[in-house]
Amino acid sequence: QVQLVESGGGLVQAGGSLRLSCAASGSIFSIIVMGWYRQAPGKQRELVANIGSGGRTNYADSVKGRFTISRDNAKNTVYLQMTSLEPEDTATYYCKVVRLWRGETSTYWGQGTQVTVSS
């Protein structure tokens, strides 16, 4: 099992910045992908950004140029630096980790952290 603890959400004005953190613990070996998803009220959960073990990143079009994902493998932590925040970024942000072990993948989710952007 992998436990994920998220932090860094909050209330910010449009144009502001926040940094989310997600620390993984437990059976953290063989983690291949760490990422962030978000879900706004009445909408489906969507990918924000993810990063592979080799550092390759992938971003949703809506956040390209504004958000930056990074990971510290020594700390088993993934970060999401969010700048130029817009009210449309308001959502619950979830950390997701994918582990590959003995040919099988396992997916783990954090409990979510709320990000609210006021106009």
Image: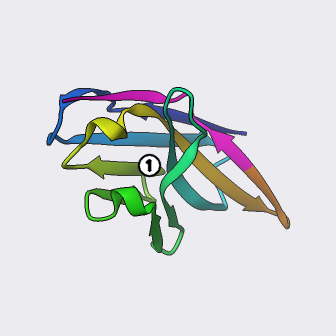
Depth check: give the residue in front, 51 or 82.
82
Query: How far across and how far down the image is residue 12, in percent?
Result: 20, 29
Query: How far across and how far down the image is residue 118, in percent?
Result: 22, 27
Depth check: give the residue in front, 111 or 101.
111
Q: In this view, does 75 lie to the left or right of 19?
A: right
Q: In this view, does 106 lie to the left or right of 80?
A: right
Q: Which residue is drawn at 32% across and 32% down?
A: 8
The secondary structure that dominates the magenta segment is strand
Q: Is residue 78 above or below residue 52?
A: above
Q: Give the range drawn in magenta.
A: 107-119
Disc 1 target residue: 77
Q: Does the magenta stretch include residue 48?
A: no
Image colouring:
rainbow
Q: In this view, does 42 lie above or below 93?
A: above
The quadrant of the image that shows the C terminus is: top left
Residue 114 appears in the rendering: yes
